[in-house]
Image: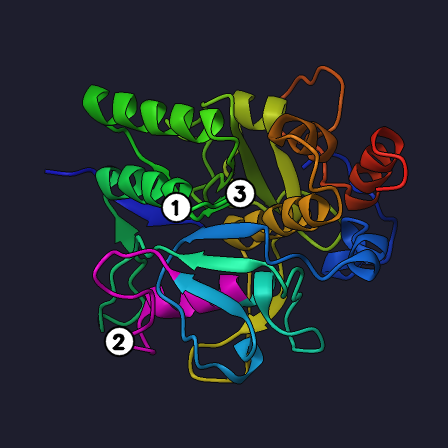
């Protein structure tokens, strides 16, 4: 029986007594002012299907990676559809929408891994084999960065090997992988977050502190990042907007930063973009530093003068 993969929802606080807005918390202002993204940077969204007819996605560049569903919602009230639409809004909603709308001019590749169900309140799940196939499909379709809203739980040796191989494939093709660390409030890692090419992401509150439900661990602390994951406004599958959070939402902020940076510096390699976003220096502990979009931009500006 396949092991389920469940949908997912630090460092020192950067701000003082006052809570920061999500974008301000990770110093996104100058990066967002510089770019809305580029059609040449494709984001693979491994999540639920998306309500592509949402008014705030009008004009978005959205393409389905064939999985039999076309990437669109059949049941807009399902948990999978709610989740996929929410994350899509963080990434490619139109600027001015009630969503972060980080990189609306980037292409979004839809490859659902969560199946729709009318069972109210149930957390969407996927199998590790489906996740591995979805990674391969998105990389093959030209994704430059993958946004993965799932982490494996106690996979078999065969599953571990398959995930490791497909993540090696992503690395060889120069496709960055950003993965939510998980919302089970555990200390440890997964087959995905342990892979050295993956950037695992934990959710932080409005003061920059890891939320209580975020998974932490050695690989997360060494190679990961914290990002906004509390009281995030984004798109609702029924129209309008809603609030949400968790490590899936946080991962989308890191993915959005990667996409904007690659849009501004198209000559940068995957390793250079990853290094700029992740920061330099050896880390210890189980809690990662906050994403610093301003610092990543400055790092690449120094490397690519006139970029």
Q: Under tag 2, what secondary structure?
A: loop
Residue at (75% x, 48% y) in the render: 264
Residues at marks 1 and 3 touching, judged by CB atoms closer than 8 Å: no
Q: Residues within 10 Å of mark 2 (few under 14, many from 20)?
A: some
Residue 190 appears anywhere in the view: no
Per the image, is 21 magenta?
no
Residue at (31% x, 72% y) in the render: 78
Q: Is 116 left or right of 233, judged from the image as shown?
A: left
Residue at image mark 2: 74
Residue 299 appears anywhere in the view: yes
Residue at (28% x, 23% y) in the render: 160
Of 127 and 247, the residue lying toward us: 127
Across and down, in percent, residue 64 comes to 36, 61
Decide: is 53 above or below 228: below
Q: Is 87 left or right of 287, judged from the image as shown?
A: left
Residue at image mark 3: 144
* Quadrant hosting residue 73: bottom left
Of 249 and 142, the residue lying toward us: 142
The mark nearer the N terminus, 1 or 2, is 2
Residue at image mark 1: 138
Tag nearer the camera, 3 or 2: 3
Q: Under tag 1, what secondary structure?
A: helix
Residue at (53% x, 43% y) in the render: 145
Marks 3 and 2 sit apart, C-alpha to C-alpha, by: 28 Å
Q: Quadrant of the C terminus?
A: top right
Tag nearer the camera, 1 or 2: 1
Marks 1 and 3 sit apart, C-alpha to C-alpha, by: 9 Å
């Amino acid at each position: 029986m396949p092991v389920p993969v469940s949908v997912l929802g630090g460092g020192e606080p950067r701000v003082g007594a006052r809570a920061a807005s999500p974008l301000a918390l990770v110093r996104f202002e100058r990066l967002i002012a510089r770019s809305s993204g580029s059609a040449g940077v494709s984001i693979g969204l491994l999540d639920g299907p998306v309500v592509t007819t949402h008014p705030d996605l009008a004009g978005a560049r959205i393409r389905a990676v064939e999985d039999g569903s076309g990437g669109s919602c059949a049941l807009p009230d399902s948990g999978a559809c709610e989740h996929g639409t929410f994350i899509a809004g963080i990434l490619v909603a139109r600027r001015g929408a009630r969503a972060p709308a980080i990189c609306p001019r980037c292409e979004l590749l839809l490859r659902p891994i969560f199946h729709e169900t009318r069972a109210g309140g149930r957390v969407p799940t996927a199998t590790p084999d489906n996740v591995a196939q979805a990674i391969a499909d998105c990389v093959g379709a030209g994704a430059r960065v993958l946004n993965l809203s799932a982490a494996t739980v106690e996979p078999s040796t065969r599953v571990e090997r398959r995930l490791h191989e497909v993540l090696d494939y992503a690395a060889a093709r120069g496709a960055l992988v950003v993965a939510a660390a998980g919302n089970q409030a555990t200390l440890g890692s997964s087959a995905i977050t342990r892979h050295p090419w993956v950037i695992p992401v934990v959710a932080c509150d409005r003061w920059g502190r890891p939320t209580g439900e975020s998974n932490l661990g050695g690989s997360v602390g060494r190679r990961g990042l914290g990002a906004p994951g509390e009281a995030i406004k984004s798109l609702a599958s029924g129209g309008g907007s809603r609030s949400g959070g968790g490590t899936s939402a946080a991962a989308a902020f890191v993915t959005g930063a990667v996409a904007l940076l690659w849009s501004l510096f198209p000559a940068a390699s995957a390793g250079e973009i990853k290094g700029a976003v992740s920061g330099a220096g050896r880390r210890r502990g189980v809690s990662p530093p906050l994403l610093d979009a301003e610092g990543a931009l400055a790092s690449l500006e120094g490397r690519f003068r006139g970029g």
